[in-house]
Image (cartoon, rainbow, N blue to C red):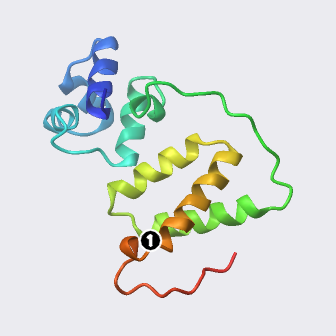
């Protein structure tokens, strides 16, 4: 089930019309219809407002199952630094829905999963096929 279908399902469970949900969120009925029909993807802030209006979490629109995460202590402070770097990257790329989705998925991970995700992205960034043409090969400081 995709995000639009999940929004529609949650809206129907709340016994709201698209127009009623739109009013609660502060957007038009047409926008709700576009999200439900996958014509457009809601921005993360809009997704949060929709979730709030339907008394669900934004993550419920993204995953069929959420697993309880085991919290791993961050004794080195490395995760805090990486979180700040990621936040900076996300703030620089406000226009892209893809970045918003990455942030949602990243936030769903426990500390161990976040470290693994960062490691995988770092590995991908070293593959020329996935690099931007103006990319320098210098490794970012940690």
Residue 40 locus on image (x, y percent):
20, 45
Residue at image location 81% in from the left, 53% down from the top: 74
Task: Report which quarter residue 87 is drawn in.
Answer: bottom right
Say if 138 sits above or below 55 in the image.
below
Residue 9 locus on image (x, y percent):
30, 19
| 30 left or right of 94 in image | left
Viewer-proximal residue among 138 and 126: 126
User: Which secondary structure lies at badge 1?
Assistant: helix
Residue at image location 43% in from the left, 84% down from the top: 135
Say if 88 sits above or below 22 in the image.
below
Split into 4 quadrants, where in the image is the N terminus? top left
| 120 left or right of 50 in image | right
Say if 63 sits above or below 95 in the image.
above
| 50 left or right of 78 in image | left
Q: Which residue is mark 1?
A: 92
Q: Residue furthest right?
A: 75
Residue at image location 66% in from the left, 42% down from the top: 110
Viewer-proximal residue among 54 and 67: 67
- Would you call the spot at circle 1 few (<14 residues within 10 Å), some (14-19), or many (20 or more)? few
- Counting every numbered tag in the picture gives 1
Residue at image location 54% in from the left, 28% down from the top: 66
Task: Report which quarter residue 81 is drawn in.
Answer: bottom right
Residue 101 locus on image (x, y percent):
41, 49
Residue 44 locus on image (x, y percent):
39, 47
Split into 4 quadrants, where in the image is the C terminus? bottom right
Viewer-proximal residue among 98 and 95: 98
């Amino acid at each position: 089930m995709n995000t639009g279908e999940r929004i529609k399902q949650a809206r129907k469970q709340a016994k709201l019309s698209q127009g009623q949900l739109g009013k609660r969120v502060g957007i038009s009925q047409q926008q709700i219809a576009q999200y439900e029909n996958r014509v457009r993807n809601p921005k993360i802030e809009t997704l949060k407002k929709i979730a709030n209006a339907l008394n669900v979490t934004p993550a419920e629109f993204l995953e069929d199952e959420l697993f309880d995460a085991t919290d791993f202590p961050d004794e080195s402070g490395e995760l805090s630094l990486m979180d700040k770097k990621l936040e900076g990257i996300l703030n620089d790329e406000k226009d892209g829905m893809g970045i918003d989705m990455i942030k949602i998925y990243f936030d769903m991970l426990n500390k161990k999963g976040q470290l693994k995700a960062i490691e995988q992205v770092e590995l991908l960034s070293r593959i020329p096929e996935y690099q931007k043409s103006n990319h320098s090969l210098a490794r970012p400081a940690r």
